[in-house]
Structures are given as C-alpha cells and as structure tokens.
Amino acid sequence: MPQRNLLILYGSQTGTAEDLAGRLGREAKRHHFQCRMESLDEYRVADLIHEPLVVFVCATTGQGDPPDNMKNFWRFIFRRNLPHNALCRMDYAVLGLGDSSYPKFNFIAKKLHKRLQQLGACPLLPPALGDDQHDLGPDAAVDPWLKDLWSKILSIYPLPPGLNIISEDILLPPKYLLRLLEETIGQDDLSGEELERDSNNTTPASESHPFPAPVVSNQRVTALDHFQDVRLIEFDISGSALQFSPGDVAMVQPRNSPPHVQQLCSLLRLDPRTRFVVEASDPEAAVPAQLAELQCIGQLAERYLDLCAVPRRSFFQLLSHFAPDELEREKLREFGSAGGQEELFSYCNRPRRTLLEVLVDFPHTTRCIPATYLLELIPRMRPRAFSIASSMQALPNALQILVAVVQYRSKLIEPRRGLCSTWLASLPPRGRERVPIWVKRGSMTFPLEPGTPLVMVGPGTGVAPFRAAVQERAANGKRWSCLFFGCRGKSKDFYFEKEWEDLVTGGFLTLFTAFSRDQEDKVYVQRRIRENSALLWDLLANRQGYFYIAGNAKSMPNEVTDALKWVLQSEGGLSAPDAEQYVVAMEKSRRFQSETWS
C-alpha cells in the first residue's frame, strides 16, 4: 500500500485560504493521512519533485496577483528552465479563492493548475473556483469539490484495513497546545511597552521581528465636518534599517483595545496576568515567533488573537464541541454545517458580527472553552498593509501612511470599526506606545529613467503611493509627473493641497483635480482624463510614459481604463480592439500598473 502522505500548501492574503487549508488538514487527519500544512513561501519548492500528493489552496488578489506569502513560489514555478517532466510523480489538486467582480477571477488558481500540468503533474480533478460574490461565499463551490476530492484520493489511497473515517463528532487535538501556568506577571509588566531595539541592530524588520516605531505625528487631513476621518500618520524609523521605495507597502501589526481584552478574559474567566507556554503538537513543527515572545494571557489577547474578526464556519464547527447547552450546541452545529450557510451569512457576515460578540451570544459554551484550544479557535490577528505615502529621499528618517479610519453602521447597536485604523487614529504623537512595523515590496514599481513621464490616477487615499513617487522625483530634480486626483470636495478631503500647489509652482507636477460633490453634476477623474486626451496621448504614445491607477476596486479602475482606451481611440485613431491590445501591451511591459483594494 502506498504511503498516505498529504502536503497542503496555501497562499493567503486575508486568511480565508489559510482557514480552508486548515479545514483540509483536519479532514486529512480524519481520513488517517500524515498531513503537513505550510504557506507556499515557507516551503522549499525544490522538494516538490519528491511529493506524491499535494493540494494547493491559493487566493487571487488585486488585479490577478498572487498573495504576499506565495510570491517567491510564483516566481520559481514559472522559471523557463524547469524540466517539462519535473513533477511527473505528483498528483495534485488546486483550490482557488477569488471574486468574480474582478476581471481576473481566480487567475492564480487557473494559471497554477495549467503550469503544474506543463511540468508533468497529474491533476486529480479540475480546480475549485470559490467566489466571494456568491450568496454562500466560496463554500458554494468548495463543499461539493471537497467531496469529489476525497472520493478521488481514497480511490488511490484507500483506508488501511480496520480503520474508518474519524467522525466529525470526535474532537481532534489542537495544532498548538496552550498550557496555563500557576504564576502571574506584575501589572507594570502587563501594561509596559516593548523595549526599543538595540541601536546597533541592523537586521531588517520583518513580521516575526517588527520595528517598534514611535508615532511622530497623527494629523487629520479631512475637514472636521467631513463624514470620514482620514489621518496622515508619521513614524520615526531612525535606527530601524528599514529601506523602501515609492510603491512599497508598510505592514502594521494592530492591537486589540483594552476593553476588548478585558471582555475576553472575563468571558473565559481568565486572569490577564496569568503566564502560559505554547507547545506544538507535532514535534517537527515550530511555535510561531510572535507567540513565543508573549508572556501572559493579556498580551496574547491584545497582540495575537483576532477578537474583531468575523468568524468563519470552522470557528462554529470547533466551538460546538464545547457546548454543554443543547440549544447552543444545536445552533453552533447548524452554523458549522453546509446546510446552515445562509443562516450563518445572515447572523455573521451581513451585520459583520465579531468573534467576541459571538462568544457573548453563546455564554454557556464560552465558559467551557478549554484554554488548550484557544489558539485553535481564535485566529491570529493579521497585519494590515498601507501604501507608503512618503519618500526616503525627501524624509530620510520618517515613514508616512494615509489612513482612512473605518467606521460604519450595521443592524447591530455598536458601530463597526476597523481594528487597525481605529487603533492608529487613537495614538497620540510622541506617546509611549510603539507601532510594530515592517516594509514589503509593493506591486507597483516606478521607472528609474529621469525623463520618463508618469501619469498617475489616485482618487481618495489611492493617492498615497503617488505622493511618495512625486516626492522622490522632485527630490531628484525629475519632472514630467502628471497626477489626476479626485475627492468629494475641495474644502473637505483635498489631501496635500498646499504640497501639490508648491510642486506645481516648482514645475515638478501637472495636477488635474475632480471634486465630485462641489457642483450639481458629479465630476470624476475619468472625465478629466478625457478632457486632457491630447496631453495623455503625447505622454504615453509619443514619450513612452507610464500609466498608474490606485484606489478603490469597485468601479473606478474599470472606468479609468475605459477612459484611457477612449483617449487612444480619439487621439491615436485606434479601433476599439486595437486600443484594447495597446493597453494589454502596456500592461505586459509594466507601463500600465494598478493597485486596487476593496
């Protein structure tokens, strides 16, 4: 009988792919497989040639980009020098997660599936294409696909004699064992901030070891009577060894609020000062560095557990095992079942009910959650990404980000608030608190040639990376920066107005603005693009300029792209198909780039 080993590799941006990979891993254990689960960039890709059975779980981000934790794998797997039969020993399946409102729906899963076949791997079945836009979310496609997958796998790797599939009613051991100690830490240690880094430490900051950055300024850049609070926040990065270029991204590890931390500890009947240790169930697995550095339950709740997340189906499946009350257990099982997804969507996703609020709604169960399963039940808090809005050339020891503070109403009494943006907005300049920060390469890159024109379209906070680019070009004496900026009102949310005026006066910037609510007829950036078609044709076609879009992913990117195609047709005389191909060619040569978010 062949060895029953399964490798699960995931590429996840928001945690959904990682959550599904975890679900696959648990099902593998119930089917008596030896199972390993790793993110794609943690795995040594060259070892794939020895893997007999692999399931890839990967999300598509932005405009058809791989998630951050699979970008290195993506570059490797598409090397042209890889032998065409390199993966001929491997059976595989691809589970994709995407959003059909984007033009490149599940692009990464489709392309990976095709590439693995080119390298000789054998697909077990066509890829699953989970869709966030479906009423039931990705599960609508994933549930039936998983059923077919296990049927196929068991036909190749049948259960060993005498063994049956482990029932869903049986609780599996957690991946990480959290053990409470009898000792506590002092109150000063609980509330104390991290020690600043050694000034001689030149190791680049990373997710496992972020730089604790002081807040230098925290300035509201929208009018006080404007509906949205947007902040320009500056961090002091002196001695951090951080390096970044325009288009790069600042990663921030957020914190839960003290009331939420206290509420969790009260619900679970835990003293926040209680010390703990974490051990991996698998002796070959390592405890994450972020966990290993925490000392007590209060720090765990503040810095690691995602208390404000909207819980996923797997949360309810696990929580039901601890329910002593029959009514609560029945409801939890319904939310965790395939047939209960409409109910779960109405209860959790539509009102954006948080994990902490769910624990309050199931008090009998919450009181019975064993500390051992805390890390299995509550997901880790993920870092948030912000486009860097400043240039190291202009501000050498500073890093600035533009933060829209998220707050909105749902049917729940409490307003919904963005975890990270609310925390950042609350931080006083030059206070004691430090912000864990590191830098990642962004998806947008800017040309080095000094004479290359840039056309940048950045409505709202989408202007952040373009401010960094314009600052850097001005600091280096480069001209031919053309910016299209849109917002609601000149007096309400015209970010960096004085700075743009100075750059225009200095000859470093050509600026076009669209204030959509300052007149009866709404004006958006795409109209300004059409109005200045002759200039754009000259910059892009005659002078080989670059075209960039950044901002909200709803309709703006498509409408701006359509406006660009209109320019190519009206000024260049191209037909509609030729204009389409022109933009495709610009995209391939990186002269057309976009960075959008929902």
Image: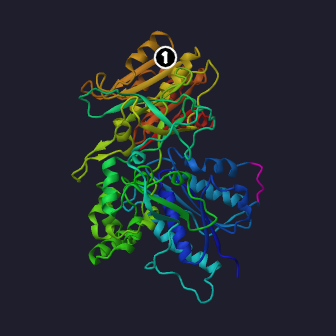
> Which residue is at the front of the view, 250 or 325?
325
Q: Which segment did they paint magenta?
A: 80-84
Q: How is the image coloured?
A: rainbow
Q: Judge from the rendering whether residue 537 lies leftward or rightward of residue 427; answer left or right.
A: right
Q: Nearer the viewer, residue 440 or 131?
A: 440
Tell me which residue sits at (48%, 34%) in the image.
Answer: 213
Residue 514 counted in the magenta span: no
Q: Residue at x 60, y 83 (%)?
A: 159
Query: Percent position (x, y) of residue 211?
Result: 53, 38
| Residue 161: percent from left, percent from top | 62, 88
Q: Could you say where residue 129 lies in the image, as x and y percent from the top left? A: 50, 60
Residue 86, by quadrant, is bottom right
Does residue 177 appear left or right of residue 447 in this picture?
left
- State the SS at label 1: strand
Residue that label 1 marks: 509
Image: 59 above or below 422: below
Q: Is residue 522 left or right of residue 30?
A: left
